[in-house]
């Protein structure tokens, strides 16, 4: 044995010592003593649990030993710099593979374009083998171990990871862990009567049981996929009925995590993909993993234990890999996905390393529509409890709708409805070109549309037209504020060139989210300089990204703190550090002058000019990053 093999083995032992007890405790709590489905002999449960935990430990140890050396080296570097994803030079980019570059091989050829923009984190949306026909943009996975043939092969995925790593980029992949496609082999086995695989899903035998659950459940797609259960007569036993749990579309079957076999299967998926070179797992629909009667089945304690156990186990097998929670829920509930200390109940960094800051994203859009920064300021206060080692994913747009109802605990319903109508272009004076999507139970309809369209950019917009300039100023503001928040900012494909909505005729009936899933416009991306809206916007954004990378105050550990005493139409917060930074954004179409307490000098680090904090003008939708100098 060489010394490097020996030291790898010693490091693995060390990680087992540290993280196995955590996983063991969580898994015993989850699966010890719970009566299993009828094919597990209860009297053997304790011995069975020990045996099963042995299998879990074996899976993790095997994956650690099989981890390719290049990835083990990356782990070592990341362990030495555990804040790597919080640094201000980090920038993500999220895209559908086919719409951005056709195939995975095409993506590899576009890495130069992304590197030039400053991208360090790639998030291609689902690309694993999918349900045939409708598949929710790939969020219905038919096989977690192969790539969708249209997009490439497993080898292409490994090659993309390698190229990304060479270019200093991390690779994030969706793990659709809450449900499989109906096409998945497990679901297909269940449909032909295999009891082992039937027990991988939640199958209810009676309409009464369905009704009892429905009484406390919300609905994600109330119009296009009403209810949470889908009749599947082939799953019926003993002449009864059969309804399978489908939180999302009828072809997305929710997995039954009360069955330990499901936990282990998904762990094996994570371990497999980690060893293909995936650095970050976006755990799709994280809140939904555990179900219990009489609850909303969102964010239950067991769901947190599952994610915490995955984290501990990945820390053994692939210690450089991160978990990203996808919970588009009330901001306080989102914070809980970073983790919590059992004993004290205080936030602790023991669950997801990353989570989407949907609250601030939504509050920012709301702030621009209403000209009122108050809710965004209140939200910043609430979000400051995040553990310092965890980071937000900050973003302006993503592939989903903007869900106004996620702010229902903070903002009056009437305001949410008004903002929703504003972005659908349905209120007087609205510049927005979005569309309303579905809402649950009388809530405000969520909003579809590309960022550029929501800020009012017309597809054929030419610079110089007043409305184009205003639209671009609003778009730049959304990004300038987002880039100054604490977290890892992720650009949504096309936003860098102010790409507008997909043609309405291309949007399938009932799935309005395709409005903001256009094909990348490479002609637009080739436009440089000030002659066109796309060129101007890209240059301005590129500049912000470059400036950001050099600002120590924008490291993501410490949270943004709201500034008090600003005019209502100005959003402002402070980032601390050796050289503190103020971010000030005028949400209105008229110039305002802000007066900050004097006693310090300021410099606008984007415009590169000294400013007087006592009388600071902000033009229409202007944002400034002011470095504080004593
Ligand atoms: C996610 O979103 C994906 O981002 C969607 O594209 C999928 O359709 C969906 O899961 C099913 O796989 O409801 O409107 O709190 O909000 O999981 C988006 C989390 C969604 C949910 C989220 C879901």
Image: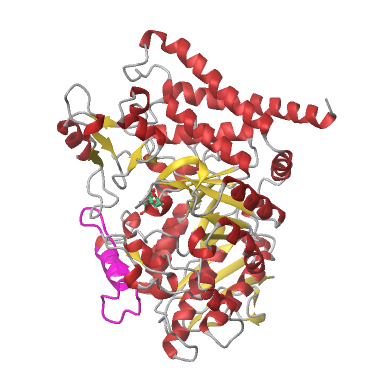
Q: Nearer the viewer, residue 439 or 628?
A: 439
Relative image position of residue 50 (x, y in whole percent): 51, 14
Farthest residue in the top direction? 43
Residue 435 percent location from the top left of the image = 31, 69
Task: Name above or below for residue 468 compared with residue 165.
Answer: below
Q: Quadrant of the C terminus?
A: bottom right
Instruction: Decide: is 374 above or below 6.
Output: below
Q: Which residues are magenta?
A: 414-443
> Up-down: is 592 above or below 423?
below
Determine if the magenta segment contains residue 441: yes
Q: Quadrant of the N terminus?
A: top right
Can residue 371 be seen?
Answer: yes
At a point 49% along the width and 26% down the height, the residue shown is 26
Res 116 → quadrant: bottom right
Q: Which residue sits at x=16%, y=33%?
A: 207
Between residue 338 and residue 314, name the one nearer to us.
314
The answer to whether residue 486 shows anywhere in this view is no
185 or 557: nearer the viewer: 185
From the top left corner, tell me how far across and down residue 236 is, in percent.
Answer: 22, 28
Question: Within the magenta stretch, is there residue 297?
Answer: no
| Image position, residue 568 (x, y; %) | 40, 73
Task: State whether residue 555 is above or below residue 423.
Answer: above
Tell me if 208 is positioned left or right of 104 in this view: left
> In the shown orientation, is residue 248 left or right of residue 61?
left
């Amino acid at each position: 044995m060489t010394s490097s093999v020996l030291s790898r083995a010693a490091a693995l032992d060390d990680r087992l010592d540290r993280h196995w007890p955590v996983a063991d405790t969580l898994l015993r709590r989850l699966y010890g003593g719970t009566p299993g489905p009828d094919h597990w002999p209860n009297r053997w449960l304790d011995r069975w649990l020990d045996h099963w935990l042995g299998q879990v430990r074996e899976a993790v140890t095997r994956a650690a030993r099989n981890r390719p050396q290049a990835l083990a080296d990356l782990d070592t570097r990341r362990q030495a710099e555990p804040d790597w994803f919080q640094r201000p030079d980090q920038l993500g980019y999220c895209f559908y593979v086919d719409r951005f570059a056709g195939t995975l091989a095409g993506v590899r050829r576009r890495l130069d374009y992304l590197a030039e923009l400053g991208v360090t984190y790639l998030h291609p949306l689902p690309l694993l083998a999918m349900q045939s026909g409708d598949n929710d943009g790939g969020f219905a996975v038919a096989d977690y171990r192969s790539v969708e043939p249209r997009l490439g092969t497993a080898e292409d995925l490994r090659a993309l990871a390698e190229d990304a790593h060479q270019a200093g980029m991390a690779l994030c992949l969706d793990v659709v862990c809450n449900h499989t496609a109906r096409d998945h082999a497990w679901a297909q086995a269940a449909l032909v009567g295999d009891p082992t695989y039937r027990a991988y899903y939640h199958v209810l035998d009676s309409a009464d049981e369905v009704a009892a659950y429905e009484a406390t459940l919300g609905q994600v797609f109330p119009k296009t996929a009403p209810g949470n259960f889908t009749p599947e007569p082939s799953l019926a036993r003993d002449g009864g009925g059969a309804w399978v749990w489908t939180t999302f579309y009828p072809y997305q079957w929710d997995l039954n995590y009360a069955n330990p076999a499901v936990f282990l299967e998904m762990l094996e998926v994570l371990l497999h993909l980690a060893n293909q070179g995936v650095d970050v797992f976006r755990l799709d629909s994280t809140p939904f993993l555990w179900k219990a009667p009489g609850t909303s089945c969102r964010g239950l304690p067991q769901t947190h234990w599952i994610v915490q156990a995955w984290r501990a186990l990945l820390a053994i097998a692939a210690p450089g890999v991160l978990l990203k929670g996808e919970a588009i829920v009330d901001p306080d509930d989102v914070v809980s996905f970073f983790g919590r200390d059992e004993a004290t109940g205080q936030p602790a960094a023991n669950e997801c390393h990353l989570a989407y800051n949907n609250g601030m994203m939504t509050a920012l859009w709301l702030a621009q529509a209403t000209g009122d920064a108050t809710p965004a300021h209140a939200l910043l206060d609430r979000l400051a409890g995040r553990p310092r080692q965890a980071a937000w994913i900050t973003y302006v747009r993503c592939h989903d709708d903007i869900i106004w109802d996620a702010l229902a605990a903070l903002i009056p319903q009437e305001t949410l409805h008004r903002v929703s109508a504003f972005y659908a272009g349905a209120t007087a004076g609205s510049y927005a070109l979005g569309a309303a999507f579905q809402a649950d139970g009388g809530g405000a309809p969520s909003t579809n549309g590309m960022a550029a369209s929501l800020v009012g950019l017309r597809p054929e917009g030419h610079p110089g037209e007043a409305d184009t300039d205003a639209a671009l100023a609003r778009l730049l503001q959304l990004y300038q504020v987002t880039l100054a928040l604490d977290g890892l900012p992720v650009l949504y494909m096309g936003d860098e060139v102010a790409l507008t909505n997909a043609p309405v005729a291309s949007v399938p009936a009932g799935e309005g989210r395709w409005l903001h899933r256009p094909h990348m416009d490479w002609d637009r991306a080739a436009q440089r300089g000030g002659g066109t809206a796309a060129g101007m916007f890209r240059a301005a954004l590129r500049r912000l990204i470059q400036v950001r990378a050099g600002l120590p105050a924008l490291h993501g550990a410490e949270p943004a703190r709201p500034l008090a005493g600003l005019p209502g139409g100005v959003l402002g917060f402070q980032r601390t550090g050796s050289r503190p930074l103020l971010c000030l954004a005028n949400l209105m179409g008229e110039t305002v002058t802000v007066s900050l307490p004097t006693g310090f000098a300021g410099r606008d680090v984007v415009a590169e000019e000294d400013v007087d904090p006592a009388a600071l003008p902000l033009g229409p939708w202007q944002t400034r990053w002011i470095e504080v100098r004593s």
